[in-house]
Amino acid sequence: MLGSILVLLVPSLLPGWALASVLDGSGDRLRKALLSPALGLLLLYGVSGGLLLLNVWSLWAMVIAFAGLNAVAWRLVYVRHEEVSQRSHWQRLEAAMHGEVSETITATISEEAGVQLEFQKNRHLPLMALSLAVAGIALLSPFLQTYPFGVDWIGFAVLSQQIAVDGNLMLSGTNEGFWTYPPAFPSLASWVVSITGTDAGQAVFHLGHYTLFVLLIGLMGAFDRHGAGAYAVLSMGLGLGLFAKTFDSGYPSVASQLGLIVGVLVLLRPSQERQRHHTLGLCMALLCIAMIHPTGAIYLALFMLSHVIHGFKLDDEEHQELVRRFAYVVSAFITFGFALALLVIAPRLFEEAVFSEYGWQGGRPLLVYNGFVLLAAMFAAIGLRATLEARIITTWFACLWLLSCVHLVEGLQNIPILSLLSYTLYSMALHAFHVPLALLVALWWSPKTNLTPVNDDVEIKWPSMPESVGLVVLSGVLIGALFAPSIALSLSQHDELQAVAPGDHALRERLGEIEGAVYTENMHWGYVWNAPEGVQTTSIPTLGLVYLTAGEQTNATRAIYADNVSFFRSQNMNHALTSPLGSIQWALAVSPYWERLIEVDGAALWALVPEGDADVSLLSGIDGEDCVACVSRLDPWRDHRFRDPMNLGDERPFLAEGTPAKVKVSSPTAATKLCMTYEVIGEVNGLYIQSSSGLERPFHALRQDAGYHQRCFDLDADSSIEHLNISWKADEPTRWVNPLGLSGRDTVLIDRTGVKFHWIEWQGASS
């Protein structure tokens, strides 16, 4: 993780410092130090995505581009004109901040400098240090675990590895075609892969959490300009949206929020303080975040639109003229973006319906993930309704909320632009509302803001949050911040939440021993992002829009179920890779044309046996009737399996740690080995299985680490087996917070450690 941070921070720090200087000449070193990592990372995303878009991405191209970016930044920061009249506006503002007096320093510049000097003088440094520590929690997970939770990261890892190897987004493995996906995030992750040599999955993990961290401190730096720097991060702590999205590995959506930092620096300032370079910076931010993810571009465009709406309401003619010029820029960008979406991307969605997987994002999901910050923001909006800044943010939030109404036309087909919008905003409750609401609360929470009254005759009734209320809110945020590391530490012991089993990771390291095409399941656990050179896999993630001209996945799947050996021989596809999370292994285990070549804890590499004389197995599921002491629990991956030959259903028997049980089994004729597939929920302290008869060795210790496992036992030919007795070392289970209870994949939020039973395989049995 430290190496990944280093290769991202070093090339981004000076460009970020330069951009912070241009956008906010009144910033001192502390503010620029907070802004630089975020603004610099935004530029890195833009440069990396631009190179990939131009089809010239390579390691050396990245090195040259980053070197050029730093050279331009150095010139901006360190080159100064001797004559004061030739200095730029932001350089004159810097001079005014240092007390310089000249004819070129206007009254507007002097007034802005005076306000900013007062803010810097009255900073609450201990509270800023506390906020920085709270933001640092975002970096904790990559230090505790190897791979993230969620499933999206697997697709990003596949794309990143493809870019690192070939420098493009052509489909990998046995497939022909290309991915259409915003290029910035996977290409910058490829930079981390190429420089550090780390695994693509880990690079994606590191980049995603580092981005969240710099976003938080960047918002702190941006709102320091309003005297509310520390409160920006603390207000973010009132919501779960972006944190939940990061936990679920939706990294590009979070990264696209970096442009909002530029929006805060430019749009929440009086128009007379905004210069041409501010508008250029805003345009640059729009271009960069459009290459990260379109959601961020949509959010920033609506922020700009809100600024324009309220700018026209002011009576000042000079102010309205400035707003009118800015409106032309906003209109041009919105028109260009709409045309690009309508003419280039949307036609590929002509057959797709409007999508609303999680329901109305402006309703229950908004309350679940941002309920507390929404409540505080409602009071803030009422208290600050007489200020221009609060009205801009409130209108911005309202525009975002209206976008969530796209769910009203769910299922409607043949309107590509609506389909594209729905696919872009499908989980917007997590990433659309968090920042606007938190910024509104921060303005109200801080006692040192200097907001712009809409009318000089109107009094701001609640200029800041009551001190007693602020202490209560601060206490709640700090309690949550204290719980967060313990929850992160607890979750790091729950590999069963991973979309890839422990055995899968170990087995992929052995793929270098084979050559040719390998069948892989078309599901999260089947997408191999780290296949050795020369090994081609059949499945690819459907990330973004996939243009597939040729592929063998469907034909190979049919051939497995039909025992079509000739197909595999004609395609030089002599191996298959399966995960214990998947279902294709069930077909291979009962087929005489496949045998296990390598097996690691339930994951298997299968070899084709053209003669059809491989050993076959009998499979039997374990249900609630087989384990009376167990309770039925939903299988989180129930919606990702499309065949169920053992009638396992959507539920699995779960046994809490410390609860003894008997699992009823029925041995078929001549079976020589019993293999049980089970799933440990959390790291347990001693899990044992025994039987008074039927096993060659009556007592066995099972694996205690979390995740899917398979354990095989030799059977005693002289006696039969009817029960497997389960016992534990611990007397009670450990309680833990199960995030799947919030996402809907599971039904339990406060969970218990234990074991889930899946199925039994009888090897060597007579059919």
Image (cartoon, helix red, strand yellow):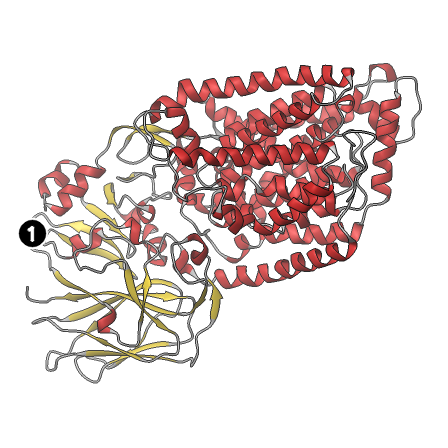
Classify residue 466 as left or right of residue 303. Answer: right
So how many labels did they put on this image? 1
Mark 1 element type? loop
Question: Quick check: can you spot residue 197?
Answer: no
Image spot of residue 323 (x, y percent): 70, 19
Outermost residue on the front side: it is 457
Image spot of residue 381 (x, y percent): 68, 41
Outermost residue on the bottom side: it is 692
Q: Quadrant of residue 55?
A: top left
Image spot of residue 575 (x, y percent): 21, 46
Classify residue 528 as left or right of residue 267. Answer: left
Residue at (92% x, 17% y) in the render: 103
Question: Quick check: can you spot residue 158?
Answer: yes
Classify residue 3 as left or right of residue 660. Answer: right
Viewer-nearest residue: 532 or 159: 159
Viewer-nearest residue: 139 or 507: 139
Residue at (41% x, 57% y) in the render: 497
Viewer-nearest residue: 654 or 13: 654
Q: Quarter of the image containing the C terminus?
A: bottom left
Identify the residue position indicated by label 1 in the image.
612
Image spot of residue 542 (x, y percent): 34, 37
**Amino acid carrying mark 1 in the image:** Gly
Around disc 1, counting alpha carbons within 10 Å, would you say few (fewer than 14), some (14 to 19), or many (20 or more)? some
Residue at (30% x, 48% y) in the render: 511
